Amino acid sequence: MAGVLRIHFSDRDFRYVQLAGSADPIWEAILGLHVLATPPSGLPAHLRPWRRRAAERGQNVELRSACRLLGDLAPPDAPYFPDFLTPVESEEGISAGLRTLRATSRARLSRELREAARHRSLPGWTRRLASGDRELLDRVADALRHFHAQLVAPAWSEVEATIAADRERRTEAMEGGLVAVLERLGPFAWRDPVLTAPYPVDLDLRLRGRGIRLIPSFFCHTMPIAIADPSLPPVVVYPVSRPASEPRPVASRSGDPLAALLGTGRARVLGALTVTFTTGSVAARLGMPASTVSGHLKVLRGAGLVHSERAGTHVRHRLTARGRHLLGR
């Protein structure tokens, strides 16, 4: 029976709210597994193309084995799956997260698998995992890495683009303060001092001055998911929707003044920068080669229409005031 997640804030908690600016790679792998196991009719339209591609790629033996192994531990219909599968360290990247997962203590494996067994029957091999079998734990980590590399990483540009749009909306809301962000954070509802959302079971998450980390997710598509263990740092992953409208294909018509000024390709790239995007994100949205997009961005940057800055291994691009003015935004 459907329940409600209730996140209880105190005054101190507002000082420690973290709004993650990017998706978490391990959470996206687990939730991508759930998308793959869900019939297309039960998914929002933007996830169906990914599921179709993933189902086609998932025919090889190694990937099917990874999906079975992970599905035993974290099936999509489970009200609970072990928290050790989604370590907080994965915010630093999938390698950091998997290192932490491989080092999970025997006591924690036993405790969390016992909790999972309270909600559903577990396959026999999980008893070995609960006893601290390191070889099995490595197989779980390897399955996550393989699933991510084969099915999630190829879609990362689209994931980034969707999360960037969510980040832009939250940045705009922040002008009204943190409460304004919480009030606009779908699928949640804010009733001071409690943030609520639909959930598989009734769950009260009491922050007790620890704050909370809110992580946007591309593959989370129905309701948020919370770390269940009250002794762990509070984390909630929530679904984000795609931007209400795709970028208008600027200069796609002959005779367009902007196309005449910039050239059709550069005008399309400029018009695609509805929010901050990486080169790969722009290329994916426009269906253009990344090398072509990179060349156009270099020219637009030289003209003062685009600002670019490095963020880790990526370079992010956004419109300058001059670029927005030229587009009439």
Image (tube, rainbow, N blue to C red):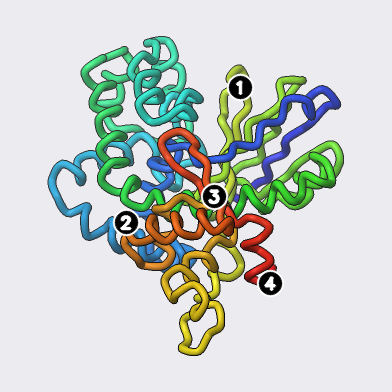
Q: Under tag 3, what secondary structure? A: helix
Neighbours of disc 3 within 10 Å: few (<14), some (14-19), many (20+): many
Whether residue 16 sits left or right of residue 273 in the image: it is right
156 left or right of 174 in image? left
Between disc 2 and disc 3, whose residue precedes? 3
Label 2–label 3 contact, CB within 8 A: no
Mark 1 closeness class: few <14, some 14–19, many ≥20 residues within 10 Å: some
Query: Which corner quadrant of the image does residue 228 belong to?
Result: top right
In the image, what residue occupies the spot 63% across and 27% down? Answer: 234
Question: As displayed, is residue 224 above or below residue 41?
Answer: above
Q: Which residue is mark 3?
A: 163
At 68% from the left edge and 57% from the top edge, which residue is drawn?
A: 321
Identify residue for label 1. 233
Pinpoint residue 33: horizontal percent, then vertical percent: 36, 47
Mark 4 to mark 3: distance in Å?
A: 24 Å
Residues packed near mark 4 inside 10 Å, few (<14), some (14 to 19) or many (20 plus)? few
Which of disc 4 and disc 2 is earlier in sequence?
Answer: 2
Q: Secondary structure at mark 1?
A: loop
Helix, strand or loop at mark 4? loop
Q: Are marks 4 and 1 in contact (CB under 8 Å)?
A: no
- State the residue position of label 2: 291
